[in-house]
Image (tube, rainbow, N blue to C red):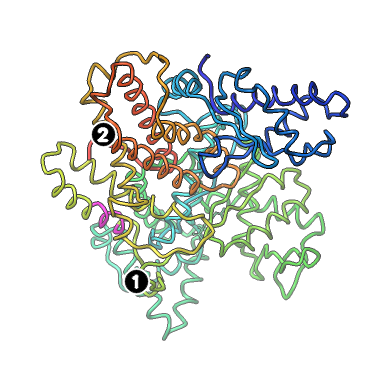
């Protein structure tokens, strides 16, 4: 048998089943062969309990076409199947199901070589080749702090980028920073009143944050500050030199700060074009809206009525003629379509912005852009820390950089205790500290509201980043101990994998399907949870079986290859959710 993935196995299996259906039920009127094969493939299930086999073929739908009872069909289709298909070991009939057990030969000769060949790219494919996706993610608002509320968009967005790249898409990551708006007016007022150039130079974004918080505190008692802020922002819009220069400076300071956090996360963006970039791109779209008659005036403001679509109107221009958040998004979408000719455009933001996206997506459609259906909003739920409601204005926001620094410090303490002589301690503490936070966050399906708990995140036991990263390091340490033995070319003999080995292989083979499912649902948590299953399966094997010093050379060779394959699978899956995998922890 040549190297073979689960996907290939399913294809061959369904080809066989379609043929068998035609042969055993000659009088049935079957759909075209390819159609039937596709239907069969889509219907395959994985029995929850491995004693029921690895793959189940439900025969209920076939019952109508083949005019026979499901158990009778299952019996016919299963007849002699293990003799005919080398990747099937056993067939059993259970009710209307044909339950199939995958053969040790498939694992040895098909799957294991396929994984060893793919290495840490295991799970990838080229289904997306030739297609382009743009992802708008992270996108913090300049001058406001980069806080825990941005964790979701940043890591979900980046994970989606990595997942799509893994299956061959060209992906453009865009950090659409909020670098335009009245917050700059507020900053200028605050800076003029209470700020100081050298303190700002020294303290950077911390100084900006203090000014921001102070502005809001003072504005509560003195609403005239807000009018002043609007006036200062208008001056920026009108090209006032001093204000523009301050704007640029505040923007630079903030970006410098973001970049530190992105570096920690291993994130680089392909584009940093933020809201300000679109100031001169909006008039064209506003004109188009005006000419098409879509835009109506209401109390001085201009808007697109969306009553027919059961949504509040989409605001395009304020009564003073200034543009709004949706106006910029419309212009940015057109620019991106013209620049990248995307096949799909994702926007990763909190669910609180769902209406905003639904509204302007509709406006794009009404404007006649035929790519409106390529725009997809990917929302996520809220995050709280220790149950407290977080607010930037109150100044009790958990900053991302502080969150990561805290995690790294704590992990460093744990490693110092567990493994004091480790040479890469700093690197390991950083990878595990940052990884713990991300893993804890990406464990839940994205739409769920979650409460962040650092202690849970940092545990080395259970469904955590440290546990899975540690398991990866364990595979690396076994391989390094085995030295030349592990480097030897893997040659499949006829060893029959034991229960723990089969259980692990059964997990490893699933990664390509998990990647597809994660992309389908824009749901990185599929991969997070999967990586835990792989780690658990490997640790069970490790605890129950001798890897180095196994009963024979052949078995040892097989187990080392399996350990390597588990390592690749862990590295690949953790990599897809933005986690690094140090060799030693
Ligand atoms: N800057 C916005 C915020 O922090 C998020 C931007 C999302 N992207 C977009 N194209 N609207 O809320």
Residue at x 41%, y 86% (from the top left corner): 221
Q: Quadrant of the C terminus?
A: top left
Using the rendered view, name the quadrant where residue 164 is placed.
top right
Q: Is residue 238 visible?
A: no
Taking the spot 52% from the left edge, 43% from the top edge, the residue there is 49
Residue 298 relative to residue 162: left or right = right
Which dot, 1 or 2, sits closer to the camera? 2
Q: Is residue 529 above or below residue 107?
A: below
Real-space Cα separation, disc 1 to disc 2, in angstroms: 37 Å
Residue 452's place in the image compared with 575, above or below, is below
Specify start and end residues of the magenta stretch as a single range. 402-408
The tag on residue 396 is: 1
Percent position (x, y) of residue 227?
50, 77
Q: Which mark is residue 583?
A: 2
Dominant secondary-structure state across the stretch colored magenta: helix
N-terminal of the two: label 1 or label 2?
1
Q: Is residue 403 magenta?
A: yes
């Amino acid at each position: 048998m040549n190297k073979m993935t689960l996907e290939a196995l399913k294809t061959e299996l369904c080809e066989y089943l379609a043929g068998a259906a035609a042969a055993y039920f000659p009088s049935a009127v079957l759909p075209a062969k390819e159609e039937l094969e596709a239907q069969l493939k889509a219907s395959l299930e994985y029995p929850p309990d491995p004693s029921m086999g690895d793959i189940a073929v439900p025969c209920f739908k076939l019952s109508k076409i083949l005019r026979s009872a499901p158990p009778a069909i299952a019996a016919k289709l299963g007849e002699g199947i293990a003799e005919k298909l080398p990747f099937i070991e056993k067939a059993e009939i259970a009710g209307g199901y044909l339950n199939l057990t995958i053969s040790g030969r498939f694992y040895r000769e098909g799957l294991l070589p396929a994984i060893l060949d793919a290495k840490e790219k295991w799970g990838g494919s080229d289904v997306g080749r030739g297609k382009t996706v743009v992802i708008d993610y992270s996108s913090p608002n300049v001058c406001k702090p980069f806080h825990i509320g941005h964790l979701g968009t940043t890591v979900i967005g980046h994970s989606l980028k990595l997942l799509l790249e893994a299956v061959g898409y060209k992906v453009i990551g865009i950090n659409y920073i909020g670098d335009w708006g009245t917050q700059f007016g507020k900053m200028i007022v605050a800076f003029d009143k209470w700020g100081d150039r050298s303190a700002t130079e020294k303290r950077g974004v911390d100084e900006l944050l203090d000014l921001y918080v102070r502005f809001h505190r003072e504005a509560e008692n003195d609403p005239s500050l807000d009018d002043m802020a609007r006036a200062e922002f208008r001056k920026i819009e009108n090209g006032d030199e001093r204000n523009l220069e301050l704007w640029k400076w505040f923007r630079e300071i903030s970006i410098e700060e973001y970049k530190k956090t992105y570096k920690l996360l291993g994130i680089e963006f392909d584009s940093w074009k933020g809201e300000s970039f679109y100031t001169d791109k909006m008039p064209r779209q506003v004109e188009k809206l005006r000419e098409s008659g879509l835009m109506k005036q209401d109390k001085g403001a201009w808007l697109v009525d969306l009553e027919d679509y059961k949504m509040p109107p989409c605001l395009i221009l304020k009564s003073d003629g200034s543009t709004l958040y949706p106006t910029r998004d419309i212009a940015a979408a057109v620019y991106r379509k013209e620049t990248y000719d995307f096949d799909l455009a994702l926007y990763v933001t909190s669910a609180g912005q769902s209406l905003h996206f639904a509204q302007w997506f509709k406006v794009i459609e009404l404007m006649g852009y035929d790519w409106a259906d390529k725009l997809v909003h990917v929302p996520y739920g809220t995050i709280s820390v220790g149950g407290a409601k977080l607010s930037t204005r109150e100044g009790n926001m958990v900053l991302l950089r502080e969150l990561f620094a805290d995690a790294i410090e704590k992990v460093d303490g744990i490693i110092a205790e567990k493994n004091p002589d480790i040479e890469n301690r700093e690197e390991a503490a950083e990878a595990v500290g940052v990884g713990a936070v991300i893993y804890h966050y990406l464990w839940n399906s994205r739409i769920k509201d979650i409460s962040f708990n650092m202690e849970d995140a940092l545990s080395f036991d259970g469904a955590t980043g440290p546990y899975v990263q540690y398991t990866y390091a364990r595979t690396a340490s076994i391989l390094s101990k085995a030295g030349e033995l592990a480097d030897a070319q893997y040659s499949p003999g006829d060893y029959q994998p034991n229960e723990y080995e089969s259980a692990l292989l059964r997990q490893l083979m699933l990664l390509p399907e998990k990647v597809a499912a994660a992309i389908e649902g824009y749901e990185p948590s599929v991969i997070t949870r999967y990586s835990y299953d792989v780690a658990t399966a490997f640790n069970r094997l490790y605890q129950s079986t001798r890897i180095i010093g196994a009963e024979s050379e052949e078995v040892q060779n097989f187990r080392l290859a399996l350990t390597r394959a588990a390592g690749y699978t862990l590295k690949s899956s953790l990599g897809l959710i933005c986690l690094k995998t140090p060799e030693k922890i």
